[in-house]
Amino acid sequence: FQPAINPLSGGNGPSDMALFGSGTAERLLVVAQRSAQALVIDPASSKTQTLPLKTAAQRILLWQGSSPRDARMRWRALLYSDTQAGLTFLDPEDLSSEPSDSVEQLTLTGNASSLIPLLSDEQVVALQGSGVNVLDLAKRTVTPIASSSPLSGALFDEDRKHLWVGPTGQLWLGSLDLDSGMTDELRLDARRGRGRDGAARIAGAAGGVVQ
């Protein structure tokens, strides 16, 4: 046995990759941000299928689920970048007949600073500077929720059903119920501090100190 290197083309500036499928049907999905394209590569034959994207992507979120056009549990991908407001849904197992039909664009109200997957519920939370977007992966819809305070320090509680934020200098904690979309406020006895100490107090409150 002797290992060999087999270089594969990954487009202009490949930034992320993910394997999907199994056995002889295993494929490699690659995004190349500078060329705004996704590539599906067969590692066995080195055959590559290139899919142009309307919005450049630098990250891949891969999961097994359904789509609005297909109720089967199959591999799905969400392609995104923290510098773009556009998201791309891709069905990498359904590229044979008409590849463009397997690519679907979704646009947020602004650039997502981070993406938090809740794959058990087929949801993704996209944080922005002043709001939250809750994405339904199965329906491929987005619910924007505005915030009057920056969400850079927002945290989940233990069961990842509520998102908590504690604005600096305010006498309340804000919470978002991801199941219902309802928001609420919880009054505090003291103002939140700044920096790491404030973040630690928020983490303690969200983790069970506040009931």
Image: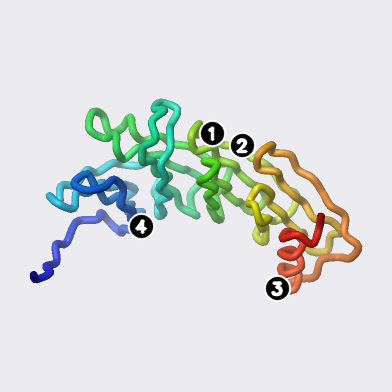
Height in image: 208 above or below 136? below
Looking at the image, which residue sits at the far left?
Answer: 1
**Disc with the residue nearer the chain's start (1 vs 4):** 4
Identify which amino acid the numbered label 4 is placed on. Asp
Check disc 1 and report the residue beneath it: 141
Q: Do the residues bearing badges 2 and 1 touch, measured as CB atoms within 8 Å?
A: yes
Helix, strand or loop status at disc 2:
strand
Q: Would residue 60 be found to the left or right of residue 47 on screen? A: right
Check disc 4 and report the residue beneath it: 16
Distance, label 1 to label 4, CA atoms, is 24 Å
Question: Which image quarter: residue 152?
Answer: bottom right
Q: How many marks?
A: 4
Question: Which image quarter: residue 100?
Answer: top left
**Disc with the residue nearer the chain's start (2 vs 4):** 4
Viewer-proximal residue, 174 or 167?
A: 174
Looking at the image, which residue sits at the far right?
Answer: 189
Helix, strand or loop status at disc 3:
helix
Disc sitting over residue 196 in the figure: 3
